[in-house]
Image (spheres, rainbow, N blue to C red):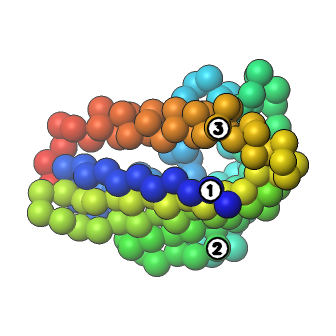
Amino acid sequence: MYSIYREQTLPISLKEAWEFFSSPSNLSKITPDSLGFEVTGDTPQQMYPGLFIHYRVSPILGIPMSWTTEITQVEHEKYFVDEQRVGPYAIWHHEHFFEEIENGVLMKDHIHYKLPFGFLGRIVHPLIVKPKLNEIFNYRFDIAEKLFSNNLK
């Protein structure tokens, strides 16, 4: 198993952070264009436990693949968890936490994941997967900074 942990502070209210980051329709806004990310099914305005979200993504060599995640846990304005049900990982468990702090909100992402293909997956991880995931989460950090840097709580 591998993990990624990220924190980000934004000068917005907890309500604004929750509304933006918990909306499946905003995922494409915070994902690099190079991934060819597209939500392929209908998505509600508010997420709920049991919600399946279907995507098409092209993470490697522009080869499209389907990815389905399930929202397994939601506590309004505190956290939500998505887990892959169909996709490129053997395991994908992504926890999103939101905490109101002075002058804004602290967001935390904790991802646990496992690659398929055993030994081959372990070889590919440092060469392709880890750099690609770092690129994606760095992009999300930068885009969130740009989108919300002028906001006041």
- Classify mark 2: helix, strand or loop: strand
Q: Is residue 42 above or below residue 71?
A: above
Compared across the picture, whether 13 is left or right of 124 comes to left
In the picture of the structure, the residue carrying the numbered disc 3 is 126
In the picture of the structure, the residue carrying the numbered disc 2 is 72
Q: Are marks 1 and 3 in contact (CB under 8 Å)?
A: no
Q: Are marks 1 and 2 in contact (CB under 8 Å)?
A: no
Please give the name of the residue rendered at 58% of the width and 76% of the height, measured from the top-left corner.
73
How far from the left and from the top, in percent, is residue 86?
82, 55
In 3D space, how far apart are the residues under numbered discs 1 and 2 (Cα atoms)?
A: 20 Å
In 3D space, how far apart are the residues under numbered discs 2 and 3 (Cα atoms)?
A: 29 Å
Please give the name of the residue rendered at 39% of the width and 73% of the height, measured from the top-left corner.
78
From the viewer's perspective, is the residue at label 2 or at label 3 nearer?
3
Looking at numbered disc 3 in the image, what kind of residue is underneath it? Pro
Residue 2 is labelled as 1
Label 1, residues with CA under 10 Å away: few <14, some 14-19, many ≥20: few
From the viewer's perspective, is the residue at label 1 or at label 2 nearer?
1
Please give the name of the residue rendered at 58% of the width and 25% of the height, measured from the top-left corner.
33
- Classify mark 1: helix, strand or loop: strand
- Classify mark 3: helix, strand or loop: helix
Front position in the image: 133 or 102: 133
Looking at numbered disc 2 in the image, what kind of residue is underneath it? Thr
Looking at numbered disc 1 in the image, what kind of residue is underneath it? Tyr
Q: Quadrant of the N terminus?
A: bottom right
Instruction: Kindly indicate the quadrant of the structure image that contains residue 98.
Output: bottom left
Mark 1 or 3, nearer chain start: 1
Label 2, residues with CA under 10 Å away: few <14, some 14-19, many ≥20: some
